[in-house]
Amino acid sequence: MDADVAVIGVGTMGSAAAWQLASRGAKVLGFERYAPGHDKGAGHGETRIFRTAYGEGTEYVPFLQEAKKLWRQLETETGNNIYEETGRIIISEKKDLETEINGANLHNLPYELLDAQEASVRFPQHKYEENDMVYVDPEAGFVRPELAIQAASQRAIELGARIYCGVSVTAIEPDDAGVTIYCGEESFRVGHVVVSAGAWASKLLPQLSLPVWVERQILVWYRAKNPDAFTLENFPTFAREREGHRWYGFPSLDGDLVKVAFHHGGDTVDPDTIDRATHKEDTELLSNFIERYIPDLDPNPVKAKVCMYTNTPDNHFIIGPVSGLPNVTMLGPMAGHGFKFAPIMGKLVAEVATGATPALNIDMFRPDRLIRV
């Protein structure tokens, strides 16, 4: 055997899995087609929101609580400033905030609800509609994605993992005794495989006919007219729902630019042929919203980047063993909202891959709900 466990795709989820597997004493191989922290997938763009209240479902809250502890642990182990707690606000009509409110009440999370007038005093950078309510999540913030992935990967290496970069896995052949991994002409034999290939998962496991689709997303940076208003201390991360669109943003990291993006609404694409250039039509609607709702940002984009969501039919993650594929555990795709969960999902999958019982129940994410081998 070349290793106890192989991790295919050392990105957002795979880097966390490699770290957690190596922490458990497993002999780990990692395969990454680019390099940890690259900008060709979903784990880049300087910032990713971390939130404790969760509109996608109250059942996610315990995973988030554990994820925050593990982000802090990764910071301690590596000496990197990965997670920044700035707070977060959600601007929407009250009826659209019920899941966050219910989840906060169920799990005793701190929060505030402000009306438009109160919010205009607390958070004057935003313009509000008369019927807006603002949910304030004081324990939210953001993660630095490239740094997080690089830190987890490096920590895995320090703990004994071997990570091969610039290597594409072309096929895997599982059997009852282990898994053979093919990288072109070369092959490896391992006891177990964690597949964390993100947008490429369907191509690596075509026999599963995964009902997922890849969505092209645009991240945009705007210049602050008044930079002091958009610092980490003065401008919490935010999300806003208006006119059928969901968009979100972050404080400035450099004292100049503020990142804003839509959540969903992009074109369905192939990850190997996606258009990575950005065009005027990619940013027009978002710039209109900026002009209307955050007037202290110049609505002319300074830069933009392309990233990808890999979506699932029920908007939940795909995590766990697959019936008919022995010694294979899937870690994603993550339905376009997984980054914040990376360390806890890496830990849970490390437990599965080494024969332990996961510390949290992951049945809701089981691959078999969507596929038949």
Image: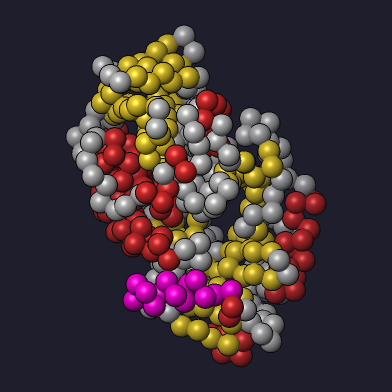
Whether residue 348 is visible here, answered yes or no, is yes
Q: Nearer the viewer, residue 30 or 372?
A: 372
**In the rendered structure, does residue 154 fall within the stretch colored magenta?**
no
Point 67% across, 81% down: residue: 128
Locate residue 36 relative to residue 68 in the image: left or right: right
Q: Residue furthest left?
A: 25
Whether residue 225 is visible here, answered yes or no, is no
- Quarter occupied by residue 287: bottom right
Q: Residue furthest top?
A: 185
Q: Which residues are magenta?
A: 96-109
Locate residue 103 relative to residue 264 in the image: left or right: left
**286, above or below 10, in the image:** below
Point 39% across, 32% down: residue: 323
Residue 313 placement (x, y as % from top left): 58, 48
Residue 119 placement (x, y as % from top left): 57, 85
Q: Residue furthest front?
A: 372
- Quarter occupied by residue 196: top left
Point 46% across, 16% down: residue: 183
